[in-house]
Amino acid sequence: MRPIGNIIHERQMMNDSIRSFFNSRGYLEVETPILVQSPGMEPNLSPFETIVRESNGIEHRAALITSPEYSMKKLLGHGLEKIFTITKVFRNDETFGGNHNPEFSMLEWYQQGADYQVCMEETEELIELVKFEIRNPKYEEIRNTKFEKKRMRDLFLQYIKIDLDNADCKMLFDACASHGIHTTSNDTESDLFYRLFLTKIEPNLSGNVFVYDYPKYQASLSRLTSDGKYGERFELYMNGLELCNGFTELTDENEQRKRFEEEAQERKQAGKTIHPIDEELLSLLPSVRTPTFGNALGIDRLHMILTGQTKIEDVILFPASSLF
């Protein structure tokens, strides 16, 4: 394990520089709940579930957040324009170590009146500031690495030879078969897409790369592009490690309800708990301006990248592998 003092000092510098960055741009730091009734609908995530009991014996199903996203969007709906939070988030069914820890630190921020292209620019500017503060001599080369932008459709054309503009479920099945990727009869388009991406594209993402415009079925809570085929969503990869996930936010409550219902069905098919739809969030979405962007960035992973570490245990004081 690395010296504890190094980890504490580096994280203090990171958090201070993150707060300085957002304070200088007029953002408000907010606190959001960790324990909620509706932690998220994403089919690939497994929240930690529990029961909240009142003193009178009334019980409520609850879970730890996988992201503060719902609460942050509610604050936007109440009129806040530029907000950020640094919080702990939790994801079950994760490996211990490597790039994962079931409890980790997340930076999430939102701005009304700007889209995901602006968010990519601001993300780059944030990282440039933080890595200047860290000044790690053992990992100096990252300072001179330029940020690139690559559209998901172009990456699939380059590495898998299929066009996402017209790729249906059969084409994705066939592509998996041709590349020796395991499939099942229950796989959705999203499942097949993700396996192809992880196997054939992600290993080729060297340097600092924004991958943007994900297929509609991977749009999550993002607005669709003008042709309706892609979500205005991006992820940043630094040295092959996924660092953040940003959107132009969807503000249409009817479309969002439809997506929640589709994701609930996917969770049911996968045998996962179906959490209730957050009705308060849906009621507040129409009050959020279009465009509005949001981004969720893993602070522990950024810490790893900027200090040249290869294991998340080397940037967390009490990793899960030491607690269980």
Image (tube, rainbow, N blue to C red):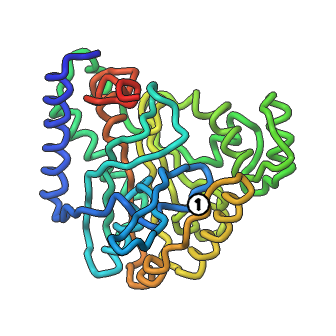
Occupied quadrant, residue 276: bottom right
Q: Is residue 298 above or below residue 121?
A: above
Where's residue 119, x and y in %? 36, 57
Which part of the image, by quadrant, shows the C terminus? top left
Where's residue 251, x and y in %? 48, 77
The kind of residue tagged 1 is: Ala
- Depth check, front residue: 320 or 108: 320
Where's residue 212, x and y in %? 53, 51
Which part of the image, by quadrant, shows the N terminus? top left
Task: Look at the image and tell me whether residue 118 can be seen.
Answer: no
Instruction: Name the residue: 65% across, 71% down.
Output: 261
Q: Is residue 242 above or below residue 71?
A: above
Residue behind mark 1: 219
Q: How many labels were placed on the picture?
A: 1
What element does badge 1 sit on? loop
Q: Tell me: 175 left or right of 110.
A: right
Occupied quadrant, residue 314: top left
Instruction: Name the residue: 86% across, 41% down.
Output: 174
Instruction: Name the residue: 30% across, 53% down.
Output: 122
Q: Tell me: 140 left or right of 261.
A: left
